[in-house]
Image (cartoon, helix red, strand yellow):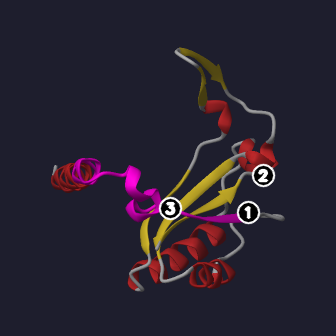
């Protein structure tokens, strides 16, 4: 199963305070463990919300809201995409993670939808389209690494 592991933002991360060398090294070592175990599919830190935008949808209308966004506890400062056997395994990996912030912090884990979760509404044609798009994304990623 794939899970999205989200590091929740803090006042410090939203202020743009970067982690120190010790924390960066600890997170690097943890990421190396994840890669060696075949768990990590992707992972990145995110800039503070002051550099972000939100697009609100109301029917056919779209409006853009510039950051920063007020509720720090609702923001994400970084993420991983993991492939694990179960939610319990994901929790065990998170328990081993160094604290991603200098003070108190929180990490949220949520399952990623898989094709079978959508039931009959996800027709064979839609599955084929999804597979084709995934293959194109992977090919683009490989091509960008070779340039």
Residue 47 in the image, given as x and y percentages of width and height = 59, 43
Mark 1 and mark 2 in contact? Answer it, CB < 8 Å.
yes
Vertical order, 66 against 13 (above or below): above
Mark 1 and mark 3 in contact? Answer it, CB < 8 Å.
no
Mark 2 → mark 3, Cα distance in angstroms? 24 Å
Left or right: 68 in relation to 116: right
State the residue at coordinates (72%, 30%).
68
- Give whichever of 106, 89 is nearer the camera: 89
- Give whichever of 27, 66 is nearer the camera: 66
- The circle drawn on residue 59 is none
Quarter residue 64 falls in:
top right
Mark 1 → mark 2, Cα distance in angstroms? 8 Å
**Disc 2, SS:** loop
Left or right: 28 in relation to 106: left
Residue 127 lies in the magenta stretch: yes
Quarter residue 100 falls in:
bottom right
State the residue at coordinates (52%, 63%).
80
Quickly name the residue at label 2: 10
Mark 2 and mark 3 in contact? Answer it, CB < 8 Å.
no
Mark 1 surroundings within 10 Å by alpha-carbon count, few (fewer than 14), some (14 through 19), many (20 or more): many
Residue 68 lies in the magenta stretch: no
- Give whichever of 9, 123 is nearer the camera: 123
Left or right: 76 in relation to 81: right
Disc 1 versus disc 3: nearer the observer: 3
Q: Which residues are magenta?
A: 107-130
**Disc 3, SS:** loop
Mark 2 surroundings within 10 Å by alpha-carbon count, few (fewer than 14), some (14 through 19), many (20 or more): many
Vertical order, 61 against 144 (above or below): above
- Give whichever of 55, 93 is nearer the camera: 55
Quickly name the residue at label 1: 101
Quickly name the residue at label 3: 112
Q: Earlier in the sequence, mark 1 or mark 2?
A: 2
């Amino acid at each position: 199963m794939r899970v999205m592991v989200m590091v929740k933002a803090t006042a410090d991360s939203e202020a743009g305070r970067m982690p120190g060398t010790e924390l960066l090294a600890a997170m690097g070592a943890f990421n190396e463990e994840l890669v060696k175990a075949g768990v990590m599919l992707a992972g990145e830190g995110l800039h503070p919300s002051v550099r972000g935008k939100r697009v609100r949808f109301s029917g056919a209308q779209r409006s853009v809201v510039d950051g920063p966004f007020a509720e720090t506890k609702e923001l994400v400062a970084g993420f991983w995409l993991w492939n694990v056997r179960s939610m319990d395994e994901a929790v065990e990996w998170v328990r081993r993670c160094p604290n991603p912030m200098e003070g108190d912090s929180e990490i949220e884990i949520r399952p990623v939808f898989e094709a079978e979760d959508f039931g009959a509404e996800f027709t064979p044609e839609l599955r084929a389209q999804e597979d084709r798009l995934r293959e194109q994304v992977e090919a683009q990623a490989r091509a960008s690494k070779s340039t």
